[in-house]
Amino acid sequence: MFPIQDQISVATKANLESNLALYTSLANKTLESVEKLVGLNIAAIRASMEDTTAATRQMLAAKDPQEFLSVVSAHSAPNFEKAIAYGNHLIGIAGAAQAEFTKVAEAQIAQVSRKVADFVEEAAKKAPVGSDNMVTIVKTAIGSANNGYEQLTKTARQAVDVMESNLTTAVNSLSQVAAVAKN
């Protein structure tokens, strides 16, 4: 084989190993987030069942319609507060997952960029005389691709920030409605 083919083979293997590590890391982070979400949902369901059972018993024990309505009213405000707490926990889980994904993706992009740049530099050193223009074109293309990745990462981060902001606004609005209903 030719030396450049050996380098390409080594680079391909390193790239595949790097991608496998990335996918494994992202899968683990996803599973951690899903595990937290499932735990949150189980806790919410358990609390909801307990509250529903208690409220039903109180409603069944009501002696007149006035007492029945006061029991129903008394259980409305805590339900709003629990929904707000659930939303805050959900935002926390989503934010932590997004931060981990971003960190892993940025590290992977930086690592791949370094490897590609090293490979191009090594190939440029061994390139035949007169291929300077081709090396410059390849370097420019790689630089453009890196800029594109950075822009994509920035745009994705902004989209997630907007989503988190919208969720926070929705939870805050629900909090205000709950406060008004409580009074």
Image (cartoon, grey):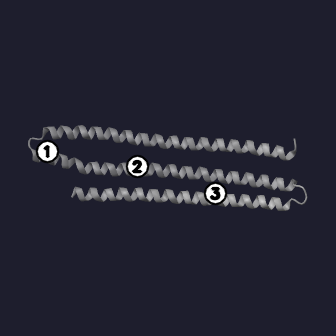
Q: At 20% from the left edge and 39% from the top edge, which residue is drawn?
A: 56
Q: CA distance from mark 3 to mark 1?
A: 60 Å
Q: For mark 2, what is the residue? A: 89
Tell me the element at label 1. helix
Residue 32's disc number: none
Q: Residues within 10 Å of mark 1 (few under 14, many from 20)?
A: some
Which callout, 2 or 3, points at the residue further toward the start of the chain?
A: 2
Tell me the element at label 2. helix
71 to the left or right of 137: left
* Image location of residue 175, percent across then percent down: 31, 57
Q: For mark 1, what is the residue? A: 68
169 to the left or right of 94: left
Amino acid type of the residue tagged 3 in the rendering? Tyr
Which callout, 3 or 1, points at the residue further toward the start of the chain?
A: 1
Tell me the element at label 3. helix
* Image location of residue 105, percent across then percent down: 60, 51
Residue 149's disc number: 3
Residue occupying the far left of the picture: 64
Q: Residues within 10 Å of mark 3 (few under 14, many from 20)?
A: some
Q: Is residue 25 above or below residue 173?
A: above
Q: Quadrant of residue 181?
A: bottom left
